[in-house]
Image (spheres, rainbow, N blue to C red):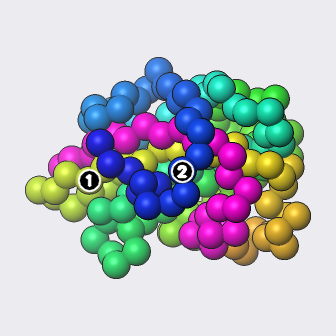
Amino acid sequence: MSTPFDHLPHVPALTLTSSDLADGAELAPPQYSAMFGVPGGEDRSPQLTWSGAPQGTKSFVVSVYDPQAPTPSGFWHWMVVDIPAEVTQLDAGVQVLPGTAWTVKNDARAAQFIGAAPPPGTVDQYAFAVQALDIASVKELGLDTEATPAFVSFNVLPHVIARGTIIAVGRR
């Protein structure tokens, strides 16, 4: 299955798993969006676990992106940055982030996980990703809480040293 990362420079793979998601499988109701009026949606982030980070990893970025959203630029649902290198998982519905990690405002400009909300009658692929970085904080790049997920992604790209993805499907 292709990912929105396929056109980027190749990096070693992280192993990314979840008790709430499976590659190619449909999202569970909690991972759909209540904010966008999806029946049964809870805007609840899934549990994520990763392993295989290379030596030199100083932090992680977790993100969820829908490249098929009905916009010319897709839709960023969630991004957490500055996850300390010793952290290897986020619990479902995480409220308190580890260490100095923080949530970048998504495309709805909310600093939270927003679940899937594909238009009725469509099927979208949601790219859940964990990227290992060779920097401890995106603030080293001059980024702050006003940065968008796309801008963070652009700026961290030269610092990505490994990546793991799960592509889940959302349909209505």
Residue 81, image x and y in percent? 72, 52
Q: Is residue 80 left or right of residue 20?
A: right
* Camera-nearest label, 2 or 1: 2
Per the image, label 1 sits on a secondary structure element best described as strand
Depth check, front residue: 79 or 154: 154
Q: Where is residue 7 drawn, in percent x and y?
A: 44, 61
- Give the quadrant of residue 109: bottom right
Q: What span is colored magenta in the figure?
A: 148-172
The residue under the point 64% across, 31% down is 90
Element on which disc 2 rests: loop
Which label number is shown at residue 107? none
Residue 124's tag is: 1
19 relative to 37 in the view: left or right: right
Whichever of callouts 2 and 1 sits on the residue coming sooner in the sequence is 2
In the image, residue 73 above or below residue 121: below
Residue 162 covered by magenta stretch: yes
**Circle count:** 2
| Any part of residue 79 in sight | yes
Q: Which residue is mark 2?
A: 10
Residue 130 showing in the rendered view: no
- Quarter of image, res 37: bottom left
